[in-house]
Amino acid sequence: MYSVETGENANQHTFGVPTWEYYAQHPEEAPIFYNFMTESSNQITPSLSANYNFEKVRVVADVGGAQGNMLAAILKANPHLRGILFDLPHITQAAQQHLQIEGVADRCQIVSGDMFQPWPFQADLYLISRVLDNWSDEQAVAILKNCRQTMKADSKVVLVERILPEDPDRALLFYLFDLQMLVGPGGQDHSLKEYQKFFEAAGLRFTQAIPLTSPFSLIEAVAVGA
């Protein structure tokens, strides 16, 4: 549960480290969590591929893409694409085998690193799926600022996140997810207006939001001035 004594999320309060560090220190437990995340991504990816136009994209970077299941599906559906998979070193260790099984390893570069440090790659499209809701507002903006720093003039960033409805009567399910993010990694879900503020703080401009498989949406932005 969330700690009323410290205000920290449950993982930090119970184990003394954030969620991602805990799984790095306990590799025997990590596959259970990452397999769950993979299965969740598998439910979203068909809708993403069907509703977003990748025709003008040449290189797509999946930031925080874990073992690359979402990226692999996108590459398979779009043979002209090349991919970059970016995540922490202990997470990307299993990615090469997965990408080979999916038949896209020859079109995908694996980059291990920390998304809170400068990103050592460039892409036409930066896919950041179910990442920002794991972090505080300040950390979410920091991630987007790093993205903005590496973007080309015509690059785009696409978030895949839950958008809190403005109507409270439609928001109960979303509030439950929001509470889950608070208790677990210590993040939260946001309204579209809040995502737009994050974009503005990072030097980005919101362009569109597209509903995907419920309860997720695609949220697109470009560099300011583009």
Image (cartoon, rainbow, N blue to C red):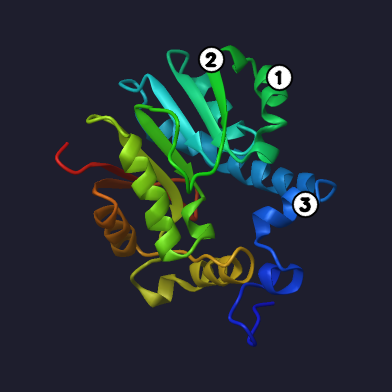
Q: Element type at marker 3?
A: helix
Quarter placement of the C terminus: top left
The residue under label 1 is: 101
Circle 2 packing at 10 Å, graded few (<14), some (14-19), many (20+), is some
- Dot 3 alpha-carbon crowd within 10 angstroms: few under 14, some 14 to 19, many 20 or more: few
Closer to the N terminus: mark 1 or mark 2? 1
**In the image, residue 48 lies at what x, y percent?**
45, 37
Residue at point 33%, 70% (across, down): 166
Task: Work out how far the residue at label 3 is from the one at label 2, CA to CA, in angstroms.
Answer: 31 Å
Of the two numbered discs 1 and 2 in the rendering, the one whose residue sits closer to the viewer? 2
Kindly identify which numbered label has been placed on residue 25. Answer: 3
Question: Nearer the N terminus, badge 3 or badge 2?
Answer: 3
Quarter-wise, where is residue 80 in the image? top left
User: Residue at left 28%, top 44%?
Assistant: 221
Given the current orientation, which residue lies at the most extreme bottom position? 5
Q: Residue at x 69, y 25 (%)?
A: 98
> Residue 107 shows which numbered tag?
2
Q: Choose between 156 and 7: the one closer to the eye.
A: 7
14 w.r.t. 226: above or below: below
- Give SS at disc 2: helix
Classed neighbour count for the residue bearing mark 1: other residues with Cα under 10 Å, few (<14), some (14–19), many (≥20): few
Quarter of the image with the N terminus in it: bottom right
| Picture quadrant where residue 193 is located | bottom left
**Mark 3: amino acid:** Gln
Please identify, in this view, whether the residue under mark 3 or under mark 2 is nearer the observer: 3
How far across and how far down the image is residue 6, in percent? Answer: 62, 83
- Type of residue at label 2? Arg
Spatial CA span between label 1 and label 2: 13 Å
* Sequence-earlier tag: 1 or 3: 3
The foreground one among 37 and 43 is 37
The kind of residue on which mark 1 rests is Ile
